[in-house]
Image: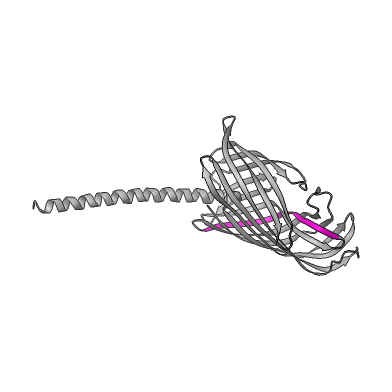
């Protein structure tokens, strides 16, 4: 009996240690699960918090008219056959309240022109499919400080934009700051300012404002991020997010053209309003998939000399609204 006692005590000690480790592991798993849920919640509502996003979009045909240096140019039917965007924001250095990340963005736009009527014979543009591809690389510096006893997030981004179809490169930059005005369980309000270092930008200084509010016991919430979107949202399928509203998106692609009357490097800039429905859902711990559709309205599409103001455009296009469909996959930190 005396010889069996140490063995029994050993098993008791072993089981005690096992349950302690199991309890600690369960606690860590619970904390990780909670952290993952918070990360998914934030990434679903604020896409800037995602590490990578890849999306493919197509739109229907619509009638368009255009001007070349203020005079009638092309008209006919235009269809954005496919647009591809791939955005990456990867942290490379984190120290205290500072973070340095590498940015990369690939943009491709394939446009089909039909029933083209050319009212400027000096420009040889006909029916067909035209593709523009650009790559952007950059660095983003972000820091958290305090201002008037409130946390302040500020930083800057430096980007180099390159045409993948010609040897044309240009640099742009942004300096920004954001401060929270109210943060509760049901309401979050932020205000900020962004200074765009780009001669062709319409507004060099852009005020920003973000408002999120959950309507109590209902599943609905409102998300307004000025100047980019206004959405009414609700949770669906326990983890997914359904959004209804308007989003403003912009894109700048570069290409060098050596065909009269165009000579040199140009930026193709579009500003579009997407009115529709979006559904996103987490399919894995760090992966979201999404789809959206609705009506696309081209607020502005211009071909400009990047060194000049956007209003001093070479070609301006007006395009009727058309339906669009978008699918995406996102990866979280």
Which stretch appears magenta?
262-283
| Left or right position of 225 against 217 | right
Residue 120 appears left or right of 150 = right
Is 49 in the magenta?
no
Considering every residue shown, the one lying at the far left of the view is 1
| Secondary structure predominantly adopted by residues drawn in magenta | strand
> Where is residue 281 shown, x and y percent of the image?
55, 57
Q: In which quarter of the view is residue 331 placed? A: bottom right
Residue sitting at the far top: 148
Counting from the top left corner in percent of width and height, residue 4 is at 12, 54
Identified at 81% across, 58% down, the residue is 264
Q: Nearer the viewer, residue 37 or 48?
A: 48
Measuring from the top left, give residue 254's x and y in whole percent: 74, 57
Q: Residue placed at 39% from the left, 49% from the top?
A: 28
In-front residue for pair 220/141: 141
Instruction: Judge by depth and name the residue closer to the eye, 93 or 6.
Output: 93
Residue 268 among magenta residues: yes
Q: Dividing the picture into quarters, in which one does residue 274 lie?
A: bottom right
Decide: is 107 above or below 228: below
Residue 118 at what x, y percent from top left? 88, 65
Q: Going by the image, does 35 lie left or right of 195?
A: left
Q: Residue at x 17, y 50 (%)?
A: 9
Q: Is residue 63 left or right of residue 120?
A: left
């Amino acid at each position: 009996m005396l010889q069996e006692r140490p063995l029994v005590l050993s098993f008791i000690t072993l089981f005690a240690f096992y349950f302690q480790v199991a309890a600690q592991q369960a606690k860590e798993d619970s904390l990780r699960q909670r952290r993952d849920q918070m990360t998914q919640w934030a990434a679903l509502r604020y896409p800037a918090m995602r590490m990578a996003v890849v999306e493919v979009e197509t739109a229907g045909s619509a009638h368009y008219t255009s001007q070349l240096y203020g005079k009638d140019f092309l008209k006919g039917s235009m269809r954005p056959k496919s647009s591809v965007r791939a955005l990456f924001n990867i942290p490379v250095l984190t120290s205290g309240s500072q973070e340095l990340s590498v940015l990369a963005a690939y943009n491709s736009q394939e446009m089909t022109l039909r029933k083209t009527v050319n009212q400027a014979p000096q420009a040889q543009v006909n029916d067909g499919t035209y593709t523009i591809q650009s790559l952007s690389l950059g660095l983003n510096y972000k820091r958290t400080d305090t201002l008037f006893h409130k946390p302040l997030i500020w930083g800057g981004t430096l980007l180099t934009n390159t045409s993948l179809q010609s040897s044309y490169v240009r640099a742009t930059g942004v300096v920004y700051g954001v401060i929270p005005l109210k943060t509760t369980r049901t309401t979050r309000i932020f205000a900020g300012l962004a200074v765009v270092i780009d001669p062709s930008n319409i507004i060099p200084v852009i005020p920003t404002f973000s408002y999120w509010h959950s309507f109590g016991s209902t599943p609905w919430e409102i998300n307004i991020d000025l100047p980019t979107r206004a959405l009414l949202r609700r949770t669906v399928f326990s983890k997914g997010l359904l959004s209804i509203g308007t989003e403003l998106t912009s894109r700048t692609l570069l290409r060098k053209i050596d065909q009269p009357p165009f000579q040199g490097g140009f930026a193709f800039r579009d500003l579009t309003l997407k009115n529709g429905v979006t559904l996103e859902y987490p399919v894995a711990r760090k992966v979201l998939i999404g789809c959206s559709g609705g009506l696309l309205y081209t607020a502005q599409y211009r071909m400009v000399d990047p060194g000049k103001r956007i209003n001093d455009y070479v070609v301006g296009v007006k395009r009727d609204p058309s339906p669009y469909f978008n699918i995406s996959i996102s990866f979280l930190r």
